[in-house]
Amino acid sequence: MKHRPGRHFLQIPGPTNVPDRILRAVARPTIDHRGPEFARLATEVLEGCRSVFQTSDPVAIFPSSGTGAWEACLVNTLSPADKVLMYETGQFATLWKAMAQRFNLDVEFVPGDWRHGVDPGELEARLIEDRQHAIRAVAIVHNETSTGITNRIADIRRAMDNARHPALLFVDAVSSLGCMPYKHDEWGVDVTVTGSQKGLMMPPGLGLNAVSKKARAASKSSRLSKSYWNWEDILGSNVDGFFPYTPATNLLYGLREALAMLFEEGLEAVFARHARHAEAARAAVHQWGLELLPLDFREYSNAVTTVLMPHGHDADAFRSLALDRYDISLGMGLNKVKGRVFRIGHLGDFNDLMLMGSLAGVELGLRLAGVPHTAGGVQAAMDVLSARDAVAKQQLQPA
Amino acid sequence: MKHRPGRHFLQIPGPTNVPDRILRAVARPTIDHRGPEFARLATEVLEGCRSVFQTSDPVAIFPSSGTGAWEACLVNTLSPADKVLMYETGQFATLWKAMAQRFNLDVEFVPGDWRHGVDPGELEARLIEDRQHAIRAVAIVHNETSTGITNRIADIRRAMDNARHPALLFVDAVSSLGCMPYKHDEWGVDVTVTGSQKGLMMPPGLGLNAVSKKARAASKSSRLSKSYWNWEDILGSNVDGFFPYTPATNLLYGLREALAMLFEEGLEAVFARHARHAEAARAAVHQWGLELLPLDFREYSNAVTTVLMPHGHDADAFRSLALDRYDISLGMGLNKVKGRVFRIGHLGDFNDLMLMGSLAGVELGLRLAGVPHTAGGVQAAMDVLSARDAVAKQQLQPA
Amino acid sequence: MKHRPGRHFLQIPGPTNVPDRILRAVARPTIDHRGPEFARLATEVLEGCRSVFQTSDPVAIFPSSGTGAWEACLVNTLSPADKVLMYETGQFATLWKAMAQRFNLDVEFVPGDWRHGVDPGELEARLIEDRQHAIRAVAIVHNETSTGITNRIADIRRAMDNARHPALLFVDAVSSLGCMPYKHDEWGVDVTVTGSQKGLMMPPGLGLNAVSKKARAASKSSRLSKSYWNWEDILGSNVDGFFPYTPATNLLYGLREALAMLFEEGLEAVFARHARHAEAARAAVHQWGLELLPLDFREYSNAVTTVLMPHGHDADAFRSLALDRYDISLGMGLNKVKGRVFRIGHLGDFNDLMLMGSLAGVELGLRLAGVPHTAGGVQAAMDVLSARDAVAKQQLQPA
Amino acid sequence: MKHRPGRHFLQIPGPTNVPDRILRAVARPTIDHRGPEFARLATEVLEGCRSVFQTSDPVAIFPSSGTGAWEACLVNTLSPADKVLMYETGQFATLWKAMAQRFNLDVEFVPGDWRHGVDPGELEARLIEDRQHAIRAVAIVHNETSTGITNRIADIRRAMDNARHPALLFVDAVSSLGCMPYKHDEWGVDVTVTGSQKGLMMPPGLGLNAVSKKARAASKSSRLSKSYWNWEDILGSNVDGFFPYTPATNLLYGLREALAMLFEEGLEAVFARHARHAEAARAAVHQWGLELLPLDFREYSNAVTTVLMPHGHDADAFRSLALDRYDISLGMGLNKVKGRVFRIGHLGDFNDLMLMGSLAGVELGLRLAGVPHTAGGVQAAMDVLSARDAVAKQQLQPA
């Protein structure tokens, strides 16, 4: 092992920088998952999860990746040949679609340009057209980690309501939960899917589903085979604080700590922090004269900023140089935007000075890689923070 | 939180006492799962796993429980209505059977009394009878954690060979791998299933499959739906040290450390240690005048000792008392033996004095609970260890 | 590094088995020792220390060993040629005496046989004889870690009072604080000296002084040179939660956790636990037919049991064998009893089953080393615990 | 506890940001300090220390702060009324002087303005004048942490040699060792004093002395009282890997890891990194239009940059605001410069992006506090790094 000095800057859009407090929690000794101490742990974690999802519905936690939680969503609610409406908003929507097809679902996949999110009006029209209500479920990725586009779930819900369409609403909140406002109940989401390693600040290894009453009812008639992902097994056991099979106890320790940290800071403060950092990051990109991948400002993500490379410059070569020289991991372009974009993650356990270090890493890397840009991005980001802080300071002062 | 003094004795048959060295490894900062440092980690772990399974075949690692690895085994290799031969050797065989049925497999489940393992002769006869080779797979639990019975896989393999039957052989080695000799290649196992939290000394959260060439070939024609568990995705990505979805990085840190520890001690020494402790534990049970659940000495487990309670005494009340008063977690009786047995786990990261403490916990608990027994079990166990050590010492001395 | 399976049994009489909860606390990131967060930490720790010492006097914490806290006691209170009365109760009394001589103090060192503690009557007579009150201080080791003898401080205080002698009373409570009742205020101790690595369950690295008003007054006229150990500097800074030089922040994290654990268990429960274990350990020694070093049962230590080896057997060879074969560290014989005794530490974060494992390690070691003894020590210890628990159980039951 | 998001920036000039790798090492279970495993640990650590001090002389490690190591240096070598020559280069020189006076040494304390280091020519003249060789020792602080001034030890050695003066040379390398080149042997230093919590990247709690043969010889005739600090005890025990009293085992684990990390990176690379960061930090200060406290560029420190506040602005109010709002700890002005300077520590485990975050914290803080300055300091620092990296990149390319 060769020591690299200082902290690594893990600025991919997840896994995020896991705070040492969570790492220490994860390192507690494993206990009997059928004993009373475990039951207290599980009950506390499940209760806390409901608060973060903003739901009174139950939450299922799987030892799995977020991908597993996608699968749990589909196999619990649907039957072969069921029609699902999905939108090509980026790589994760594309992967979820491919998964649905593997389970012989009939996916209507609305093509997209990876630079726009779902148009709620288009969705409404499409649902109105589905007079037979053949569409059993609409599945949307809230925050497309691959593009930095955040879909407007509240508007999508409204579109479904306007169309008076009974389809289930599935939302992938893997990279939005704990970063930006998310309201499972208020938005009438039926299944929210997430993972531990983004806004929840955890190591990867847990997949989660928040499950509405309607979704759970749908699971009774679902004919897709399932065992590991079966909600009834897990939600049934959870009532007493247990699991149908050995849970990932140490990751649950971490999740308990993560939830405590979110509540200490306050969810509203957490969301405001992410908004602040995203605005500053975009100011830097603007100053550099580079282009954001998302084209609609209403869909800018507060979790990740995706930047187009100027023509003739390879984003992966730039990322590799930044990693080698400045010890910063940036997100790669996936699939259709491979080599053409890089992504700056600014989600999870993060603060102003970590953001400044990260943006400096990008700017230093651009310079070293010979990518055309205008210097001053870090300064522009600082200006955003300063302006906000000056206002806040003034408001605190007596008139 | 109320402090209980001293170390808890986690003597359920898994999760086992996780060594602090592994806990510290798990607490390392999470890294980019698509970067070069991760690729080195994954490659090293996958290589080490092959050594422990004693195979040159690839090993797939899932973020999951061992149960998930059962599911991966079934859905990758089989198609609906395929016939699978299973034996009721205890609770885990029963659960695996139930899972197979959920996937619409046609399970031939040979009944058992929970006190005997699989009879290789009976198996051979049954396979010979299956002239059409309708049986696609034989699935056996190597070490039945619920009963303390270890099936003789080498003999079962021989029976299959004798019968010249082409069925696939699936083995659940969840509580045997890293505890007793296991030879995936030599025994011609097609899929070995395991989890991280037993002989691998890890927290729970990883499920593993070792996959023979024959099993992988079978997966090409399998028609059970799969996505998360799909071997092709994972084994394909693994070639370069990556995973098709975000892996449980921190648990992989732990697994790397666990493998290093097994190799430092030496697998043969690890197995000898487990045999030594199991023999001592049985001597204690014998001295107490209590009865072992397994009836055939050839099937005694080296990982867990399962003890029948005298009639009129509830095993769970005894376990609860031992936990409250002596801070030791013992395994509960499951399903058909609920309340009738308790189980002493002596697997994983364990040594002579931890065993003595554990047996003392049982004996003190029996006494306090008023369970009829003869004192002296701990002494009897010490006699076993002493006798072995005296011999070893003599052998070291010059003639 | 070669992995040894299982937990090491660290049964020297300190450092003791540090609980993982404290180790995790010690691993928190270091902070600014001049910032507000540190001030809260220090204030909380200092307050908790006073509770453990059972004093309302201030406590000084040095980055040092317990030896350093001895030195702090002497150099803060005395002047060259001052007369100090000390008793040869074992190795630590002898070392403290040697230290005093290095500072040109005039030590009256009452010889002892290492098998008895201080006789309060003898002390009283000696003080009465000192009509000029030449003796400035009486310095006693509360629990002689080297011999397993506990001096009766309350009686010693009474003797001083009876003699109406104004000498300061210094007590080394290094291996008694947090193990057995200790009352700095009630016993009129002027300086209590301790270290972090025994009953406080911590890694070594902190030395502590509880300082009475009388001792602090004496420090004003003391003419021994001092800087690092100067109470005025440290107690003055402590008022605001700071230190005159960089404190050992991470060890203070651990101490805060240790104090919380002691209070969660309750000091009385902690003392009762140590008494219980010591009684059981002595029962084992008795059964083995071996002899305790201490001859007066009123002076038996609850922290450490010191055992004489039969003639012709080397204690160090036995200890080395026990370490090699059973992974248990036992305390060595020091100075006058080198090679003639071994010591079993049963203090700090310890419980019944750890004690049983430890005694099993001793008994297995005796057997392997060919030391003449009668088997059954572990059983005898279990009988002690069982008898106590049976009584406790009965008392809980309704009449 | 209230969670603050992200990593704290601990930019006081020590304790420094302790890398998690060291924190995990510190959290290993404590072992018997008289056993074979400890002896291997101590031997390895002591050997590594010699490499860092660049000496073949022995190194003594005390459980203490760096202040303790100052005291060890004085009391081991000197006798009451011995004359010591010291220079007022800042707060730490002043404190060391005060300590020497407490031990009744006759200190000649050459006054200074806190903006210059020692003038070797002046020193040479002063020594030449001391024809009787009354001066027994010259004591210099290598890097004055309070002012950011680095004394030129090689030149000072040359001055002493030119004067043919036999005085001992004591050097405080607390905040220079592991940050900038240090050569105990080559520079003919007699006692080098350091602590664990600066360039060694450790938590505080260890004080170290490297001891030349001449210093050790001097200790034979020294008449200052000593016990805890006595070199003979410690260096004697160290020969076999032991200590005369319980060492701070867990901190030694950390030191072993720290040494490994320094050697992995390479000492020359470590020094170059510190030089790089210091140059960038000064560029930022220059751009801000603020003044450095040191006036002679040859004495600029590579470990800490000390900045004068514009008149009418309180440095402590600024620091407090930066801590509250940007979660960065900056060093306070001590003694004569209290409230007039702030200090930016850029030593220890640190990298480019951490520096950029730190400088951003200062610039944001200056702005929020309304301290007059020109924006662009971070940018200026980036320019320094970029320019260096561009040259390095070019040199790597084929002609």
Image (cartoon, coloured by chain):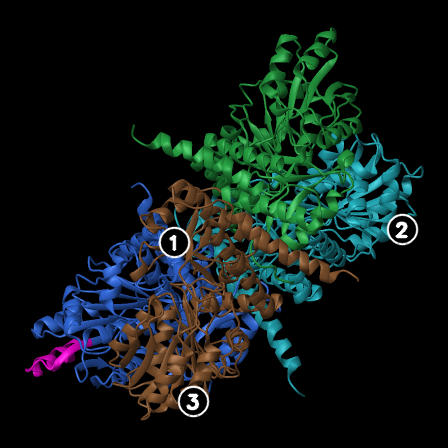
Chain colours: A brown, B blue, C cyan, D green
User: Which percent across, then down, holds residue A10?
Assistant: 45, 53
Q: Say which of C383 and C217 sits in front.
A: C217
When asked about the image quadrant of residue A173, the answer is bottom left
Residue under label 3: A214
Local crowd size for mark 1, using a 10 Å CA cut-off: few (<14), some (14–19), many (≥20): many
Q: Say which of A323 and D127 sits in front.
A: A323
User: Which percent across, then down, holds residue C294?
Assistant: 66, 51
Labels 2 and 3 share a subunit: no
Q: Say which of A141 and B121 sits in front.
A: A141
In what element is the residue under mark 2? Answer: helix
- Marked residue chain, label 2: C
Residue under label 2: C161
Labels 1 and 2 share a subunit: no
Instruction: Work out which residue is located at the far bottom of the displayed protein and give it.
Output: A132
Q: Distance between the residues labelled 2 and 3?
A: 81 Å
Q: Does the magenta stretch include residue B127?
A: yes
- Marked residue chain, label 3: A
Local crowd size for mark 2, using a 10 Å CA cut-off: few (<14), some (14–19), many (≥20): some
User: Which percent across, then down, holds residue C214?
Assistant: 88, 46
Residue B257: which disc? 1
Residue type beneath disc 2: Asp
Residue type beneath disc 3: Lys
Q: Nearer the viewer, mark 1 or mark 3?
A: 3
Residue B336 visible, this angle: no
Start-end of magenta stretch: B120-138
In what element is the residue under mark 1? Answer: helix
Q: Nearer the viewer, mark 1 or mark 2?
A: 1
Q: Do the residues labelled 2 and 3 touch (CB within 8 Å)?
A: no
- At x 32%, y 32%, the residue is D397
User: Which percent across, then down, holds residue A177?
Assistant: 49, 70
